[in-house]
Amino acid sequence: MDPLRVQAPQETKLHFLDYWRIIRIRKTVILAVFLLVVITATLVTFILPESYQSTCRIKVDRDISDIRFLDTQGAPQGAYDPYFIQTEFETIQSEKVLSNVASDPALDLKNDWGKRYGDGRPLSTAEVVGILKNKGKVSVSPVRNTLYMEISVLSERPKEAAELANAIAKAYKEYRHDQRKTLNSGGIIALKEQIGDQEKKISDQQKIVTDLRESLKVPDSVAYGEQPAPLVTADTFRRLEGLRIENKTDYVKQKTVYDDLKALAFEQLEQVLPTTASDTILSSLLEQRSFAEQKLVQLKKDYGPQHPEFSKTTELIDDLNKKIKARVDGIMISLTQKVESSKKALDQIITEVEEAKAKDIEAVTKYRPYYEAKAKLEELKRFNQVLQMKLATENIENSLPKSTMVEIMDEAKPAGRPAKPNKPLNIVLGIVVGLVVGVGLAFFIEYLDTSVKTIDDVERSLQSPVLGVIPQNVGLIVEEGVDSPHAEAYRVLRTNLLFSRKDEKLNTIAVVSAGAGEGKSTTVFNLASVFAQSRHRVLMVDSDLRRPTLHKMLRITNSLGLTNYLLKQNTLEEVIQTTSLPTLDFLASGKLPSSSLGILNSAQMKDLITELKRRYDYVFFDSPPIMGVSDASILASEVDMTLQVIQYRRYPQPMNIRAKQLIEKVGGNLVGIVLNNINMSQDESYYYYSGYYHDYYSRNEDQEPADRPETASAERGEDETKS
């Protein structure tokens, strides 16, 4: 498997405690921003000048009279119209209304505000209006779903605010009345001019109608109608049309019967005609012939053809056949005459109807100009009547009072307390905004911070277990003592490390980190000390040849060390030094010649590691940062196990992931992660890794101080037995 390929991180859901952890960690930022916003809001609130607000409430209605004469507005009185309200809302704040307030001699705003806002000279009307509109002194707000409006004015003087609000309401009322009066007067004048023009048009059109009547010789019976009178009345036309339809139906029926009879043979015809034509003579002849034929059949049977009676009957049948044929021909001739007669009658009726229609069309065409001129004259007269009615309505409407268009319901009064600034509200808003901005900034900083924050972050991104969690401000275990809380953190790390080994023969451990300053040297020293305290033969090797640190912790010289042995200048016994712990030895880095930078990647180094595995129970190697120097990668590939140290909230996660990938790429055995430098006081999620042990041992010290030596001896004996 490619060591550089890392499994995709699993999706995680944030718990409420995760948000609380962020707030606790970033509490300094939150508190600083909170105090800054609150203090700023408070100072600004107390620095701002005080302003008093007075409000005048008015009722605004359409341009209607007090007496309901004719409602021409299209909407019932008192109905709520949002467009009308919004229009008047803007009208109150318009320059036409406010300019009347600015010119009011009772207020004398030009001189007063000239001294207050100007250089002492009187202000112009436009400047006063600009102060009213632009400095937020005037505000108008409609009352929802009503015809009421509130005119509010802010001023440093309570009396001035009330006077301005009342003056604006009165100016708006006068503006509405003057506007309505001007519109009515202009409308009446325009209507009178329109009526004069209309009467002249009526007179001219009347002359045209009279001339057309005389020239076309329109009779009186026709002239007084509104359109040409037809020569054929409607009743006559309906009667003729009924006769035409009736005759046509009779003709079609007779023609159909005649055509059907004509197509039949004579034998069929003489059988059908008695029922079709209802002829009694033909029916009687047919009946006599039938009787004679029956008699002939009987005579032939009884007497034979030679009998005189048979001959007589035969002659009778022949005579009847002749009469039947003659009667059939007569009936057919009669039917033919009836069909022709019906056709002539139908043609005559159709001719009369068409002649009547033609005469009517001729009369209509002849008199059309007269009737068109007459219709136009009637239209002009009707329009003139409408104008006369409108003029009368406007005259009456103009004479009626209109006090309800604008009514001042509540006059403004001087305020007893300032409206601005609202000190309690501003301070409360400052507190709320400060908290929101502080918390938001804290979460934003946390979002930008891609470093390691929790164990879950490490295990999710690096796919490796966390073997130990080391608290902040850890000192040297040798100096702090065996029973310090920090020592217990390293003992937990030692236990997890031992259980992570797949083979007991794996005893060389390299401690690496992605960047500098993550605490790997302190981790190596304290972890080796913990192993040594449990009666294991332990060796610390300072493999950070460029920036060695372990010799400073032990306060010994770095003149002889690893480089001297690898360059074959000294033996192993000469370079290994002892420490204050009997079972802990130390191999310093030694001086690094500039010509031997790749000295760790040599056969001599591999032989050294093999020899140290044989001599010691555990060998710990301190290394430089793996991201900057190749020595750490070489060590990771040569030792049995590798520990990666990650400092809490220091480097971004991609850097730590890359360090892990480099270890796996060179074939190193990464057994786990050490999360270092945890601030237990800020992040209480790590309390159980260190704080619990501290509290537990503190209670034991308070309750059983006399048993402490024996307890310590028992623990050392147990560790010795395990080793």
Image (spheres, rainbow, N blue to C red):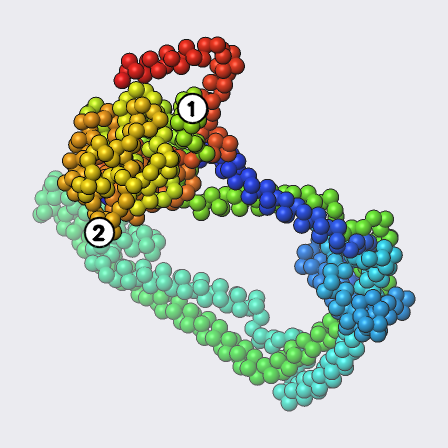
Residue 88 falls in image quadrant: bottom right
Q: Where is the C terminus found, in terms of image quarters?
A: top left
Between marks 2 and 1 in the image, the one whose residue lies nearer the viewer: 2
Give the camera-side residue of 193 and 658: 658
Outermost residue to the right: 106
Give the camera-side residue of 302 and 570: 570
Picture coordinates of residue 342 (x, y %)?
40, 67
Residue designated by label 2: 595
Mark 1: few/some/many CA within 10 Å (<14, 14-19, 20+) = few
Q: Earlier in the sequence, mark 2 or mark 1?
A: 1
Q: What amino acid does circle 2 point to?
A: Ser
Write the residue at 26% across / 46% down: 592
Write the residue at 71% across / 74% down: 383
Residue 117 falls in image quadrant: bottom right
Q: Element at badge 1?
A: loop
Q: Is residue 111 visible?
A: yes
* 532, above or below 272, in the image: above
Residue designated by label 1: 481
Picture coordinates of residue 311 (x, y %)?
14, 50
Q: What amino acid does circle 1 point to?
A: Gly
Give the camera-side residue of 8 and 153: 8
How far separated are the C-alphas under marks 2 and 1? 42 Å
Q: Where is the N terminus found, in terms of image quarters?
A: top left
Quick check: 347 left or right of 80? left
Quick check: 100 left or right of 566? right
